[in-house]
Amino acid sequence: MFADDSFLSRLIDNQRSAVRFYRAFAITIFGVGLGVMVLALVWPGESVGERIKTLMTIGGVVISSLSTFQLKEIWNRKDKIAALEAVRAHVGKLNEGDADQAERTRAEEFLSQLVGKIMG
């Protein structure tokens, strides 16, 4: 079941779509934080100094904390993609070659454990 190339391809595609989502979300969060900072600079009012300080702090917190979290998730997903592609290449070699049944069984067990770690 796990050694099926289409199954591994679906897992890799799911990880890639997660990377795209996290990237878009990080860009959106960065844009919101930057927008708050720009708003602080152009907003007219009486107590401009205190408002600028507060909005700059909020914008800086949004940019630094939330964007960094998304970048960490992107790096984790890319590591998972690399691991799955390596497993897919190894499974392809096992399916092409004349590997004995014990080696195929061991590869299946390893793959099921790897998928459990990656997906769980």
Image: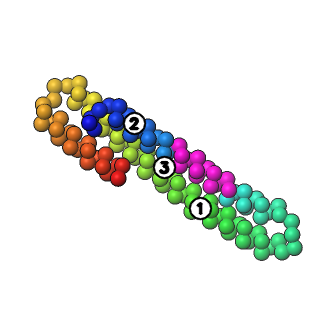
* Image quadrant containing the N terminus: top left
Which residue is painted at 58% across and 47% down in the image? 24
Is 21 one of the magenta-colored residues? yes
Asked if residue 89 shows in the view, the reply is no
Q: Determine the image quadrant of residue 32.
A: bottom right
- Real-space Cα separation, disc 1 to disc 2, in angstroms: 33 Å
Q: What main secondary structure does the magenta stretch of the protein show? A: helix
Q: Amino acid at mark 3?
A: Ile
Q: Which region is colored magenta? A: 20-32
Q: Residue at x 26, y 48 (%)?
A: 113
C-alpha span from label 2 to label 3: 18 Å
Pointer 2 with pointer 3, Cβ within 8 A: no
Type of amino acid under label 2: Arg
Against 118, residue 41 (above or below) is: below
- Residue 4 point in image, percent of width and height: 29, 32
Circle 1 Cα neighbour tier, 10 Å, few/some/many (<14 / 14–19 / ≥20): few
Q: According to the image, label 2 marks what residue?
A: 10
Q: Circle 3 is placed at which residue position? A: 74
